[in-house]
Amino acid sequence: MVQRLKAYKFRFTPTAAQRKQLAVEFGCARFVWNRCLDVRSTAWKERQEKQNHVSLGRQVTAWKKTECPWLANATANCLTQSLIDQDKAFKNFFDKRGKYPRFKSKWNKQSVRYQLDQRHIQSTYRSGEYLKLPKLGFIKARWSRIPTGIPKMATVSKDPSGRYFVAFACEEGVEALPLTGVAVGLDLGIKDVVVASDGLKSGNPRHLKKQMRRLKFQQRRLSRMQKGSNRRRKQRQRVATIHAHIAAMRADFLHKTTTALIRRADVLALEDLNVRGMMKNHHLAGALADVGMHEFKRQIGYKADWYGRTVVTVDRFAPTSKTCSHCGRYRETMLLSVREWTCPDCRTHHDRDVNAARNILSFATAGEAGLARGGSLNWLSHRLSTPVEARTEAEKLDEAVRLERAA
Ligand SMILES: [Zn+2]
């Protein structure tokens, strides 16, 4: 049994009074974040002095007594949580995991976090349908499912399209799924988000692309509206709603696909693609982001962890589509336009992507030992003499370009 941290997120409709109080909470937390970020940056630049949430918390208390008495209208704990988040953001920056923390804008997603104590939990979903939070009173969420485990924090957020959510993280045990005795290779791409070695093709719903016309139309209207006007504020919300819709559809598709794959196989083989590097090509970033390749790999990773599955990766330069998965013959030239082909040696008829997925599986599971056998050897010598451009990532990009042109 694996312990996992599972997030539960519920939508809720605040009352008018709660909306008002939340606006105060969001505003104060954002103010504290921005002002403390400034204090931190100056302290470091001018005096090489490091600040943390404790020292900054003292300053916030001082501001409450002098220049910003209105900060007292917000829940003190929310302000502290915001400073703790900032500590984490700085730690990520110093450990080279993240960028330098940035100022928060009132136009982006707003959120505050509450530390829950036993009293809150007593009055939450355990006994009824309500969650009680300081200064807000009872919140009626849409409990689409009842969380198990005990949450320590609750995060209340408002997205740019104006929806309110409350989220908990609960630690809970999860049972591994029963073994299936199946191993699959997965070829990630753009025509199909994923093709499995057993022939499954996911298709690519291209949510962003499909909504593009609608999105562009609304964005154009937004750009023509006067800054600071009420109409512009409403239009901004309209654009945000379309974005939220696209994100929700994409998430739904990815979760269903990854869960289905995790259920079907014990071992999942993937290509070790450099998705971030590929995203740097701005002509294709859109098509690639629409696929959600990075998110796909992330979901496969953590779900495998939860359910006791194994993920293996194959070298990103392995010639997965140019090798016959049946006899191992390597073909020097194979145009991307070739979707199906017949091996001249063993006469096996291949679907390009399924063949690639089969190779990913055999390369990943056999490892280097497998490569030393028979036909696979010639790609190894070939690899040393081919420029990097000729490799898998370039191929994925080519595929994206072709699809963009065709569309
Ligand atoms: Zn063959």
Image (spheres, rainbow, N blue to C red):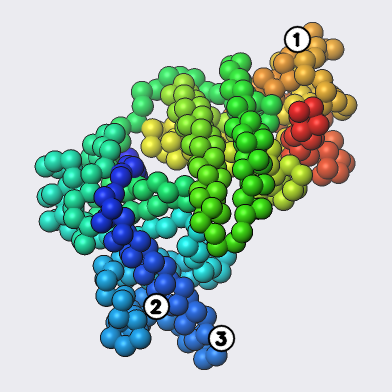
User: Which residue type carries mark 2?
Assistant: Asn
155 versus 57 height, above or below? above
Q: Distance between the residues labelled 2 and 1?
A: 64 Å
Can you tell which quarter of the image residue 200 is in? top right
- As helix, strand or loop, the secondary structure at mark 3 comes to helix
Q: Which mark is residue 52?
A: 2
Identity of the residue drawn at 56% across and 54% down? 232
* Nearer mark to the viewer, of 3 and 1: 3
- Camera-near label (2 vs 1) is 2
Residue at x 52% of width, y 85% of height: 42
Q: Can residue 367 be seen in this view?
A: no
- For residue 124, above or below residue 63: above
Name the residue that disc number 3 marks.
Answer: 45
Between residues 321 and 256, which one lies in front from this camera angle? 256
**Callout 1: CB less than 8 Å from ligand 1:** yes
Label 1, residues with CA under 10 Å away: few <14, some 14-19, many ≥20: some
**In the rendering, at what x and y percent does residue 103 appear?**
51, 69
Labels 2 and 1: the sequence-earlier one: 2
Residue 192 appearing in the image: yes
Q: Is 301 situated left or right of 399 in this image?
A: left
Q: Is residue 85 left or right of residue 70?
A: right
Residue found 82% across the figure and 20% down from its top = 338
Q: Is residue 171 left or right of residue 229?
A: left
Above or below residue 362? Residue 112 is below
Crowding at dot 2, Cα within 10 Å, few <14 / some 14-19 / many 20+, comes out as some
Q: Which residue is drawn at 26% across and 37% down?
A: 143
Amino acid residing under circle 3: Lys
Residue 133 sits in which quadrant?
A: bottom left
Q: Distance from label 3 to label 1 (Cα)?
A: 66 Å
Image-based side of 389 in relation to 200, left or right = right
The quadrant the C terminus occupies is top right
